[in-house]
Image (tube, rainbow, N blue to C red):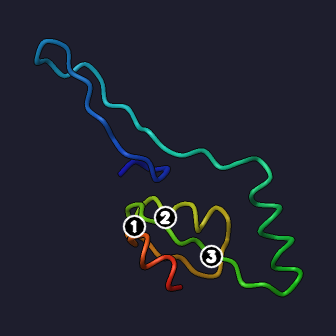
Amino acid sequence: MGERGGTLVAVAVEGRLVAIIEISDELRPEAVKVVEYLKKLGMRTGIVSDDAPEAVKHYAEVLRVDFYYYRLKPFDKVSM
């Protein structure tokens, strides 16, 4: 996992490593403000995701949500 919660990908050309890049989701610009607004209304906020723990934890910290779950299957998400 990269520092920003992304996935590190090795790039090779003809069998030789030429780069390591990080691929990650990008939060919408208004996401932090929306979470803050919902909290002011007294709502608990969270993330329910099938992503890896490191990525979910990163975004949970950025958004300052109350809880987060990771590596959940679709059925697990629905039952929450």
Which structural element holds mark 1?
helix
Q: Position of residue 79 (x, y in %)?
A: 50, 85
Height in image: 74 above or below 15? below
Badge 1 amino acid:
Pro
Q: Is 29 left or right of 64, judged from the image as shown?
A: right
Badge 2 amino acid:
Val
Name the image quarter holding residue 8: top left
Q: Is 7 left or right of 80, judged from the image as shown?
A: left
Name the image quarter holding residue 10: top left
Q: Which numbered tag is attached to residue 42?
A: none
Q: Which numbered tag is attached to residue 53?
A: 1
Q: Which numbered tag is attached to residue 56?
A: 2
Query: Which residue is rendered at x = 62% and y = 76% of the image?
Result: 46
Query: Which residue is rendered at x = 31% and y = 30% of the image?
Result: 20
Of marks 1 and 3, which one's residue comes earlier in the chain? 3
Q: CA distance from mark 1 to mark 3?
A: 14 Å
Height in image: 9 above or below 49? above
Q: Position of residue 45 (x, y in %)?
A: 69, 78
Height in image: 80 above or below 9? below
Q: Is 42 left or right of 20, judged from the image as shown?
A: right
Which structural element holds mark 3?
strand
Pointer 1 with pointer 2, Cβ within 8 A: yes
Query: Which residue is rendered at x = 43% and y = 70% of the image?
Result: 74
Q: Which residue matches tag 3?
A: 46
Q: Position of residue 19 (x, y in %)?
A: 30, 24
Q: CA distance from mark 2 to mark 3?
A: 10 Å
